[in-house]
Image (cartoon, helix red, strand yellow):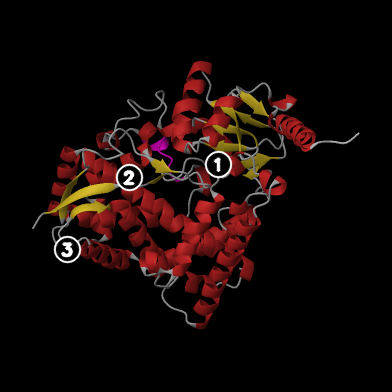
Amino acid sequence: MTLTLKDVLLTLLVVLTIAVYRWVCVPRHLRHIPRVPILPLLGSYLSGEVEERRVKRILLPFAHKANTDVVLVFTLGEWMVHILDTKIGKQVMDNKAVRKQEQNADMLLWRLTGRQNVFTTEGDIWRRHSRIIHDAIHRTAPMEQFSALARKTLSKMGRGGLIRWSDYTHRFTLDVVGTTVMGYDFEALDNPVVKRYQEVMAAISTPAYIFLPALERWIPRRRIRDMVDSLVEDFRLLLKRKRESPGNDVITYMFDNPDMSEAEFRDNVVVIFMAGHDTTAGALSTVVCFLGQNLAVQEKAREEVLRVMGRDEPQFEHFARMPYLNAVIRESMRVNPSSNVTMPRIADIPVQAGAYLLPPRTPMVLSMCAIHHRNTLWEDPSVFRPERFLGSDIDQDSNWVPFGLGPRQCPARNFSLFEQRVMVSMLLREFRWKLPRESIHRDHIRNSFSSFALNLPYNVDIEFEPLY
């Protein structure tokens, strides 16, 4: 019997369908947890919908209808528990048996970041990395550098007009990470390393491969894998040059600590570069966009900045006396948090998550985006209202989790917050601005697709008018 090409293709399709079905079929030991239907998730991923919209369109309505704080979601190639409540999240994150899950070896994202850095390690290794990076950031005291780079950015804006602000935020945060963390001038977006990074992130952010990472084995993307390896080599060479020419930067101070291997240095530099500029660039695009929509809020924040800081250089003590500016930034990060979910966690023993007992080795994440938009935790969660952070409501503070929850929060939290405060305060005293009527962000912030599940607003065009 001779098989035709049609027979072969049909057989392959049947085999692939069976394999995918077995892959996405819910394991028996997880069937007691409310499960988000697979077909809407599949459609969401294949259409390229971003995590933030998927959470609001699918996860939250399902959780509300099921009256649950814990849902089962198929993501990153497996069924994973998403925790939608801070109290349950704290209960899980504080559990000493809970640790970060080993990264999926199929995903090219982890080939880029490596597995020996502050975001992926656990236990004593994580504590060591976190301490070294925290101490190094503290020693650089980059407030003056933030101000200098903010002035440089504002000077490039000239007399304002229609400006693609999202491009400027990436240039600013790249310069911040380059000069304060790496001791290296990236010269914003003209640097070949930066361009290669952008090309790699765009290439690996293919929705189908994120929904089902096993595709990297079934249909390998060798050209993209080579691109990733080439970019990692670029960072290795940057480290080599930094050893030969130390300076006043985070990497130099990291080198002072003998407890890190070369692989750990390299992996930490890659993830600090990625998280250090992408997340804050997204946050700065978001807050300026919201202030361009809410002109009364913008004016109130400007009045506070001029009253407290005047024409002086920004200092730490200034921001301690700017409760409204701080509230604006906090509210902006609530509505559109830089990251949507934490790194996945697992435990080798059963873990209680609210009303559900999770079997051993069940992957689980804290969904910061969902927590920030639950009607049970926030009044009118879709509304931008900085005043909600001006009171002394402890619950509001405990439900604000853009940097994660528990003892393993982002170690660069304060670095990012001061970076935002400096740029926004200096921008407020030089310009007033508004969102153009035809903006794609008029109804809601539109984020680009990210393999890291980050919220990165794109094409943020703002009309700036100089104050003087």
- The quadrant in which the C terminus is found is bottom left
Identify which residue is drawn at 47% across, 44% down: 449
Q: Is residue 402 magenta?
A: yes
- The quadrant in which the N terminus is found is top right
SS of the residue at dot 2? helix
Main secondary structure along the magenta-highlighted residues = loop
Please name the amino acid that badge 1 sits on.
Pro
Above or below residue 185? Residue 391 is: above
Q: Is residue 178 magenta?
A: no
Please name the amino acid that badge 2 sits on.
Thr
Above or below residue 188? Residue 402 is: above
Identify which residue is drawn at 32% across, 50% down: 284
Please name the amino acid that badge 3 sits on.
Asp
- Pair 3/1: label in front: 1
The Cα–Cα distance between marks 3 and 1, rounded to whole angstroms, is: 47 Å
Residue 286, disc:
2
- The answer to whether 421 appears left or right of 50 in the picture is left
- The answer to whether 385 appears left or right of 199 in the picture is left
Mark with earlier residue (2, 1): 1
Question: Residue 143, how many percent across, how many down?
Answer: 31, 64
Front one among 81 and 238: 238
SS of the residue at dot 1? helix
Q: Residue furthest bottom?
A: 244
Question: What span is in magenta?
Answer: 397-403
Mark with earlier residue (3, 1): 1
Which residue is tagged 1?
207
Mark with earlier residue (3, 2): 2
Which residue is tagged 3?
312
